[in-house]
Amino acid sequence: MKICILYGTESGNSELVATDLFESLDDDHDVVLEDLADVDVASLEPTALHLIICSTHGEGDPPQSALPFLEGAKNTRVNLTGIRYAMFGLGDSTYVNYSRGSEHVDELLAGSGAERVGEYGRHDAASRDDASALAEEWARNVLETVPDLESASL
């Protein structure tokens, strides 16, 4: 199964985490890495698992690079039934809208019929945790929950 790692970023943090995740999966899987700014929501592949890494900007807003993806989905009202995805949000819990940017993407996908698999992963910038290490552990857990990838490993 193909794994598509998609990221939405404002300052580059989500891109760095997504790139680290790509490198940890690339040897064992068919993996692609794309900025959400370059992804047409109608082109999401039902045969792929989409791992989405998304930050939060401002007062709980989605990051700049996720905006074209979100607008495209709203404008086309695409049916995403059959699309599987997992979400990993980056944010800072000292703000009231912690990790809300990723929730915008999650709500849009779910509202269009896509199915979220695995736990909703999150990284808190107020912690001392390494975002890439958390994302790799999250992805490992997600891959174990997807029937087509039960034997997958990082």
Image (tube, rainbow, N blue to C red):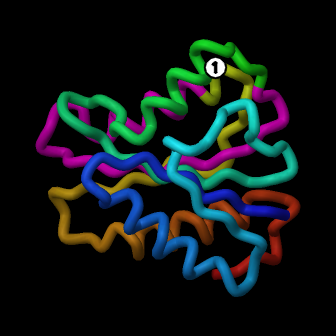
Question: Magenta span has 97?
Answer: yes
The residue sitting at the bottom extreme is 27
Which part of the image, by quadrant, shows the C terminus? bottom right
Q: Which residues are magenta?
A: 80-108
Asked whether 83 or 11 is in front, the reply is 11
Residue drawn at the location 70% of the way across and 69% of the way down: 31
Q: Is residue 92 left or right of residue 77?
A: left
Judged left or right of residue 16, residue 97 is left
Q: Which residue is mark 1?
A: 111
Position of residue 79 relative to residue 147, above or below, is above
Residue 118 versus residue 8: which sits nearer the camera?
8
Using the image, determine if residue 69 lies above or below residue 5: above
Q: Position of residue 135 (x, y in %)?
A: 46, 66
Q: Residue at x 30, y 73 (%)?
A: 130
Q: Secondary structure at mark 1?
A: helix
For the N terminus, the image quarter is bottom right
**How packed is label 1: few (under 14 Cα within 10 Å), some, or many (20 or more)?**
some
142 to 106, vertically: above or below: below
In the rendered view, does 59 fall on the left or right side of 23? Answer: left
* Residue farthest to the left, as pictured: 94
Front residue of this view, candidates 33 and 149? 33
**Amino acid type indicated by mark 1:** Gly
Instruction: Give the residue at x 77% y 39%.
Output: 83
* Residue 57 is inside the magenta segment: no
Q: Number of labelled discs?
A: 1
Tell me which corner region of the image, top left, top right, bottom left or bottom right, holds residue 34.
Answer: bottom right
User: Residue 133, image x and y in percent?
Assistant: 41, 75
The correct choice, above or below, for 61 with respect to 38 in the image is above
